[in-house]
Image (tube, rainbow, N blue to C red):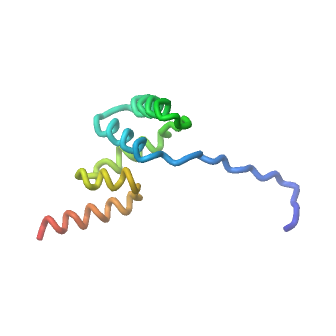
Amino acid sequence: MKNTGQKVKARKSRGRNFTPDERAIMLRVITQDGTLDDVNAQLTKHQESEGLSNRLMPIASYMMMKNSYVQHLQDDDAVKAHVFHPATLRELKSRAMVGNNENVQ
């Protein structure tokens, strides 16, 4: 590989993944119309009590969860599945469509 003299920026790692407990906290606070500050306060409290490194919910993730994900988590089974095995928005939408089709028949 030819050295062009250009500096390459290292991509900053986002750190660790959220735990299932943290994902449950985020969903609970958001579905109760909590703000991003409310979510992050609850996350910080939980992380301190569990001895976890501090990881806050980014604003973009909060907005996506509030405006897109929550409407597709229609029942307790869907919420539990998402907490333990997070799905993409596309997967959630397709599951919701399958569930709606089953209810029609």
Residue positioned 36% across, 63% down in the render: 91
Q: Quadrant of residue 77?
A: bottom left
Q: Is residue 98 left or right of residue 84?
A: left
The spot of residue 103 in percent (x, y) is 14, 64
Q: Answer above or below: position of 37 versus 77.
A: above
Q: Answer above or below: position of 44 versus 83.
A: above
Q: Is residue 73 left or right of residue 3?
A: left
The spot of residue 75 in percent (x, y) is 23, 52
The spot of residue 16 in percent (x, y) is 56, 46
The spot of residue 20 in percent (x, y) is 41, 47
Q: Where is the N terminus found, in terms of image quarters?
A: bottom right
Residue positioned 36% across, 53% down in the render: 82
Q: Which residue sits furthest bottom? A: 105
Q: Is residue 5 left or right of residue 35?
A: right
Residue positioned 36% across, 43% down in the render: 24
Residue positioned 74% across, 50% down in the render: 9
Q: Answer above or below: position of 69 versus 94.
A: above
Nearest to the observer: residue 27 or residue 8:
27
Nearest to the observer: residue 6 or residue 77:
77
Nearest to the observer: residue 72 or residue 55:
55
Q: Disc count in the image?
A: 0
Q: Which residue sits furthest front? A: 50
Q: Where is the C terminus found, in terms of image quarters?
A: bottom left
Q: Is residue 91 left or right of residue 103?
A: right
